[in-house]
Each structure stands twice: as C-alpha cells, then as structure tokens.
Image: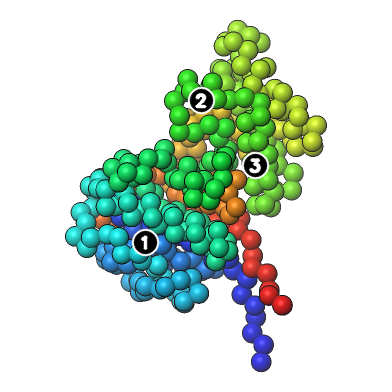
Amino acid sequence: MSTEYDDRPFIAVTMGDGAGIGPEVTVGALVHPSAYADSRPVVVGDAHRLRLAAEALGLAAEVVTVEGVEDAVFAPGRVNVIDPGLLPENLAWGEESAEAGNAAYHYVRIACELASAGRVQGICTAPLNKSALHRAGHIYPGHTELLAHFMGVEEVSMMLSTPKVKVIHVTTHIGLIDAIRKIEPGLVERTVRRGDEAMKRAGVAQPRIGVCAINPHAGENGLFGYGEEAEKITPAIERLQADGIDARGPLPADTAFFLAGRGDYDLIVAMYHDQGHGPVKVLGIEAGVNITVGLPVIRTSVDHGTAFDIAGKGIADVRSMIEALRQAAEMSPRLALQQ
C-alpha cells in the first residue's frame, strides 16, 4: 500500500525574546488552521513560555517538547518545540532582561545549525530585543546580522513584503550619513541581484524593479546633493540592464513607492533603512513580513518589534507571524523524494 509523499519543507520557527510578544505570535500562528498547509514548522523556544502565551490568548494548544524535527508530529492544535531550557519559569513579561536576550540568541543559533545541516529548509523568526541581546553580551545590530554570522555569510539583504509593495534595502542598521558613504555601485548591484533572485524564487518570472535615488527628486539634475545618483546608482543599473534584469531608476523615492503601490513595480530598492521602512509600515505593517535574502535558506520574520508594553496580555496581533510562516513555506524548496 503506497502513501502520498510529503514534500512540505521543514521550517524552524524561533520564539524570539520570551519577555515580549514573541511567544504569543508564535503559538498563535502555529495553531492557526493554515499552519501546516504548506510546511512543517518546528519551534525553537521555551515550551513553558508558549503554554503561558496560549493561556493569555485563550487558545487551546498542545505544546509538546521534541528532541529534533524528525520527532515532530504535525496535527492541528499541536505545537512542536525544541526547548534548550534557557528561560526561568518566573520571567516577567514586558521587561528587558539578559536571560531573555541570551535565550533569543541561542534560538537563532540552533535554527541556523538545523538549516546548515539540511534538517530545515527555511527559518521564520519572532522578534528579539536588541538591547536585551546586547545586555547578554551578544553585540549585533539586529536579527539580520546575527543570522549572517551564524550562516557564515558576509553580505545579505533585508526585504520587506506587504500585500501592496515589496522593498529590498541597500543599507539597513546604520546612521544616515554612514549609509550614504557606504552606498556604492557594487553594493547596489548585488542588492538588486539578490532581490531579483528572491522574486523569481517566489514565482515572478521577470520582476520589474524600481531603484530609489538617494536625494529628493533624484537629485533634480544636480540641484540637490552632490551627484550621488550618477556616481553610486546609475552605473549599477546600467550593468544590471545589460544582463537582462529589469531595473529602472534612479527614481524619486516618493514617486517610486506610489508607483509600486498601484502595481507598476514588483520590487522597490531602498537606499537606506527609513526610506524603505516608512512607506511599508504605512501600507501594511499588520501583514508585513521581513525577509532576509542571500542566506543559504530563506528567512522570514514579522515586521514589528517585541512590544513589551502589551506582552503577556493576550492582545498581540498574530497576522504578521501567520503571513511570515506562509511566505517562508512559499519561498523554501520542496523536499525531493529520496530514491
């Protein structure tokens, strides 16, 4: 008697900072009816904390500790957890702590080890707290850089995805003056290529990519700025177009996002953090997803923080985590049948 082969990818879901809303959005997404439709997610986190989160949300969840992804059983209402036992049971909600920061760090480490070993095909992360991470002695600017460190990758890109617009960033967690100094044609070109590859992986055969300028009005023919567009962006676009990539610009950023919102572009390339994050958060933070491209596996995350002010109160919005898990499944490779 033959059974149908299950090719759903395994996804490591990191719980994030245990004092924030990470446990709530994690358990909320894992008991959602769509949780196991296209993937087999296994949480790396704290089982006790997830049970408390389910109780706060009023959800019936069977939280089960497993040794590895191979031991997980994917049944409705069940949450499989790899628990390294790093959090105290009396951890306070909504308070920054080294214990929670350290645990969040190790959840990411374990997920990356699973991915590097081929035991999971994607990673989906709940939010961690940078200050708590630093308090624990783990000095990284954010999640993206931490993942790159564990995966041994020197350069990755952050992509934000909402129902209306997708944005990839040339620079992220650095000051604006430093960002402008860092932007150069090679970095712009590599960022666009990573975005083009990610969009194709998601099923867009020929992505239309709008590349933002640095200055207002794209410099207005030299009236604003000091020729940054011609020096730092245009050479990259010319090389990309020569390779058949549909990259257009440099575009005034305010116009670019308007055009993307009405469907003219599949992806916008932002030059710095707030240039991309601002419009995305206006257009759809509730369903926004943060995607890291350039890693050996795809990584998706919620596009919000730890929200200490509402943690443990059962009012966290789980929609972004549900969408992050869905996109992780969509962009991760299906498992091939072993002969």
Q: Amino acid at mark 1?
A: Gly
Image location (x, y in percent) of residue 14: 42, 57
Q: For mark 3, what is the residue?
A: 194
Image quarter hosting the N terminus: bottom right
Q: Nearer the viewer, residue 243 or 219?
A: 243
Q: For mark 2, what is the residue?
A: 179
Up-down relation of residue 152 to residue 193 (above or below) = below
Alpha-carbon distance for marks 3 and 1?
30 Å
Image location (x, y in percent) of residue 86: 30, 60
Upstream in sequence: badge 3 or badge 1: 1
Q: Are marks 2 and 1 in contact (CB under 8 Å)?
A: no
Q: Nearer the viewer, residue 229 or 55?
A: 229
Q: Amino acid at mark 3?
A: Arg
Q: Amino acid at mark 2?
A: Ala
Upstream in sequence: badge 3 or badge 2: 2
Q: Element type at marker 3?
A: helix
Image quarter hosting the C terminus: bottom right
For residue 244, side relative to residue 221 (left or right): right
Label disc, if present, on residue 323 of the rendered structure: none
Name the residue at the top extreme: 223
Alpha-carbon distance for marks 2 and 1?
34 Å
Upstream in sequence: badge 2 or badge 1: 1
For residue 238, side relative to residue 324 (left or right): right
Alpha-carbon distance for marks 3 and 2?
19 Å
Question: Measuring 45% from the left and 38% from the top, which residue is drawn there?
Answer: 281
Q: For mark 1, what is the residue?
A: 45
Up-down relation of residue 51 to residue 276 (above or below) = below
Name the residue at the bottom extreme: 1
